[in-house]
Image (spheres, rainbow, N blue to C red):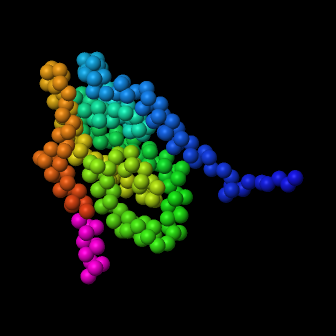
Amino acid sequence: MTETTETPQTRPTRARHLPLIAIAAVAVVGALTLRDQLDFEALAAHREALIALRDANYAGAALGFMLAYVAIVAFSLPGATVATLAGGFLFGVFPGVLFNVTAATLGAVLIFLAARWGLGDRLAARLDASEGRVAALREGLRENELSVLFLIRLVPAVPFFVANLLPALVGVSAGRFAVTTFFGIMPGALVYTWVGAGLGEVFARGERPDLGIVFEPQVLGPLLGLAALAALPIVLRALRRRR
């Protein structure tokens, strides 16, 4: 029998997939066990304890909240919307929105880095070596990278988890991903943080917040306007090519 030796190039790369596997495993366990622990009813039930904790140690409460929010996003756990509401409820519109956007961006970057380390580099190399429509699609994304990244953040129809994975799989730089995520999610986060800041009255009436407010014309209109503004460079480039 002949023994085959593995070189660094041919050595199995299972270790590179471990972060993604860990994220997927925690996400599944979290979906099964935390669905009833990270919902609006849980926030309503623990609101007095959370306020007392915040009043006793504001800095510690803010840091603990952000770390929990990062974990929720990074491991795709249920409760991201409730966490955004909690940020407004506990810390007000400002600095609540800053805490929310920063934590959500950090969590998204962790998913991005895990996906890029495990799959992104190899997939991006294959896309670069491809031809035909795939190559044209990749080249078009490169030309309009910032616009596309802002669009997938601004348009409410794009799931947050998908918007974290796709850029990693097509070779987007981490810096551009972080910047477009931070500023791209800010409008929507501001709306939900504002709703969260008014939860005191909602709790007093024993009601639930209206999370569909983001689809109201007065809110959706400006969001779609920002999306159209982000798409404008893509349209202009397409018109120039036709000419």
Which residue extends farthest right? 1
Residue 203, given in percent of the width and then of the height, sits at: 18, 22
Residue 5, given in percent of the width and then of the height, sits at: 77, 54
Q: Quadrant of the C terminus?
A: bottom left
Q: Residue at x 49, y 65 (%)?
A: 127
Residue 45: say if magenta: no
Q: Residue at x 61, y 45 (%)?
A: 15
Decide if residue 3 is on the left or right side of residue 69. Answer: right
Q: Which residues are magenta?
A: 232-243
> What is the magenta segment's predominant secondary structure?
helix
Q: How many marks?
A: 0
Q: Residue at x 20, y 27 (%)?
A: 208
* Residue 50 in sight: no
Residue 53, given in percent of the width and then of the height, sits at: 29, 20
Decide if residue 163 is on the left or right side of residue 243. Answer: right
Q: Residue at x 37, y 28 (%)?
A: 35
Residue 238: say if magenta: yes
Q: Quadrant location of residue 27?
A: top left
180 or 201: nearer the eye?
201
* Residue 121 in sight: yes
120 or 58: nearer the eye?
120
Which residue extends farthest bottom? 243
Q: Is residue 165 above or below residue 86?
A: below
